[in-house]
């Protein structure tokens, strides 16, 4: 990416970050009522983005660790950048939870009084461990070039004089040995962070949309789709496209495309079982998905299929790789948003109602948590369905966090030796 374009992009990202900070300050002063979440719909855009970031982080380190565990040497030219994206998206996953908390100033209670029967503290622990392993992995890969180029980093002592070519080769061999030892730790941890994230949802007994043993595997498939797609985008922008990088792009494209297809297969396998029953609380979310949420579901499916086609057909055409990656990211993000609507709009509290000679169940309405209107023009206080659309505040805060991740990755890429030397 040309320096001029990078400068323009950096300025735009800074603008988004400032707007996001202002939106966060506004939300903190007014409360979560400025979002479009309500009592009946308590997780929204922030949690969907959290799940998306976790998957992207997991996929980034899978790319790097595969070099040593599965002999995927084609990926070596992009391994350093992949570890940086893994680290930053893991940080982003923790950061996006702050606005969702509502009172982030009370975050210290998570450490002082953790509820170990909840999976959320465990998810935070796994994410923190993953971030640490990611940064260690990245430093291990880049250490020889950091010392050779005398790049100043916090807590890193540089040699007093320039290292010789012989010492440089020794450091590279040592880095490879350490990376091989870290890979068996990094890959399981990458899978674990997405598995625990899925368990946070799957263990909520009141939400039939999240039930089933396939939720964690679909999360892993989504991670293996988005991680390579993100690495492709950043690699094309920062490293370009040449003969040395072409095999890496081909493999990343295949991994992402195959993972998307596997994700859709598992997704529709669950749908088939639910359709087969054709009744009960497990069937109710499908009526919402293929009813009011159908347009978003169409985006999810068609974009993933379109990205898979482009990846398989044009894996050596940079412009098509960019298009495929963007389609895939949008498709997976839609998939994340659809975790919420069918889950929250099947209200678990029900009561029997006699209609004619039969008895049916009605959802017990939830209080919204706010009173609107007046005595002469009252508005709904109780609902049994909430049409959640993120508010402008939620969108601006989320864009601010996304911008921060991209901006820091770009700055780290300027400062660190992200290109693998022969």
Image (tube, rainbow, N blue to C red):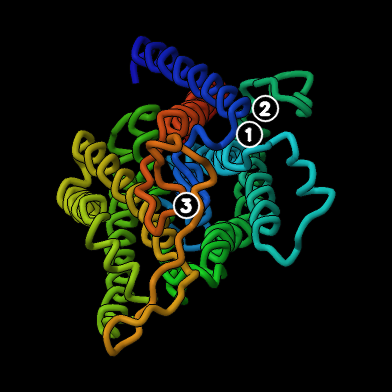
SS type, badge 2: helix
Quarter of the image containing the N terminus? top left
Q: As drawn, which residue projects farthest toward the right?
A: 112
Residue drawn at point x = 33 percent, y = 64 percent:
263
Tell me if residue 362 comes above or below residue 420 in the rendering: below
Q: Are marks 2 and 1 in contact (CB under 8 Å)?
A: yes
Is residue 96 or residue 109 the one in the foreground? 109
Residue drawn at point x = 40 percent, y = 65 percent:
346
Answer with mark 3 or mark 2, whichever residue precedes in sequence.
3
Left or right: 349 with respect to 383? right
- In space, the residues marked 3 and 2 are separated at their CA atoms by 51 Å
* Residue named by callout 2: 147
Residue drawn at point x = 76 percent, y = 60 percent:
115
Tell me if residue 65 comes above or below residue 239 in the rendering: below
SS type, badge 3: loop
Give the numbered dot on residue 41: 3
Q: Residues within 10 Å of mark 2 (few under 14, many from 20)?
A: some
SS type, badge 1: helix
- In space, the residues marked 3 and 1 are separated at their CA atoms by 50 Å
- In space, the residues marked 2 and 1 are separated at their CA atoms by 5 Å
Q: Position of residue 411 (x, y in %)?
A: 52, 22
Q: Position of residue 169 (x, y in %)?
A: 61, 37
* Residue named by callout 1: 144
Answer with mark 3 or mark 1, whichever residue precedes in sequence.
3
Tell me if residue 160 comes above or below residue 132 in the rendering: above
Q: Nearer the viewer, mark 3 or mark 2?
A: 3
């Amino acid at each position: 990416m040309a320096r001029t374009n990078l400068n323009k992009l950096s300025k735009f990202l800074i603008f988004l970050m400032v707007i996001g900070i202002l939106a966060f300050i506004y939300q903190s002063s007014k409360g979560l009522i400025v979002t479009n979440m309500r009592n009946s719909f308590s997780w929204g855009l922030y949690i969907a983005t959290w799940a998306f970031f976790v998957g992207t982080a997991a996929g980034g380190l899978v790319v790097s660790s595969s070099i040593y565990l599965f002999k995927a040497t084609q990926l070596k030219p992009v391994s350093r950048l992949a570890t940086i994206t893994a680290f930053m998206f893991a940080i982003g996953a923790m950061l996006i939870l702050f606005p969702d908390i509502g009172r982030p100033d009370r975050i210290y209670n998570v450490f002082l009084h953790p509820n170990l029967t909840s999976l959320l503290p465990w998810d935070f622990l796994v994410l923190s461990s993953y971030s640490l392993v990611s940064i260690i992995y990245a430093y291990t890969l880049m250490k020889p070039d950091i010392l050779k180029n005398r790049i100043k980093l916090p807590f890193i002592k540089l040699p007093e004089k320039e290292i010789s070519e012989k010492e440089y080769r020794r450091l590279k061999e040592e880095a490879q040995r350490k990376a091989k030892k870290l890979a068996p730790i990094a890959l399981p941890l990458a899978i674990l962070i997405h598995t625990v994230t899925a368990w946070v949802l799957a263990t909520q007994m009141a939400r039939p949309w999240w039930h089933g043993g396939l939720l964690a595997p679909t999360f892993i498939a989504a991670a293996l789709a988005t991680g390579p797609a993100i690495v492709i985008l950043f690699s094309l922008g920062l490293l370009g496209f040449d003969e040395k990088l072409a095999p890496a792009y081909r493999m990343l494209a295949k991994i992402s495309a195959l993972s998307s297809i596997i994700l859709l297969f598992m997704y529709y396998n669950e749908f088939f079982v639910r359709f087969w029953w054709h009744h009960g609380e497990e069937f109710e979310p499908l009526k919402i998905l293929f009813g009011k949420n159908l347009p978003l579901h169409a985006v999810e499916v068609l974009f993933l299929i379109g990205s898979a086609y482009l990846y398989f057909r044009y894996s050596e055409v940079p412009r098509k790789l960019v298009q495929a990656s963007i389609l895939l990211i949008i498709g997976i993000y839609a998939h994340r948003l659809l975790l919420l609507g069918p889950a929250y709009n099947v209200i678990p509290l029900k009561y029997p109602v006699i209609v004619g000679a039969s008895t049916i169940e009605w959802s017990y309405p939830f209080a919204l948590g706010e009173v609107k209107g007046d005595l002469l023009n009252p508005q709904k206080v109780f609902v049994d369905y909430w049409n959640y659309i993120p508010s402008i505040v939620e969108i601006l805060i989320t864009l601010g966090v996304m911008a921060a991740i991209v901006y820091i990755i770009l700055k780290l890429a300027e400062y660190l030796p992200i290109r693998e030397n022969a």
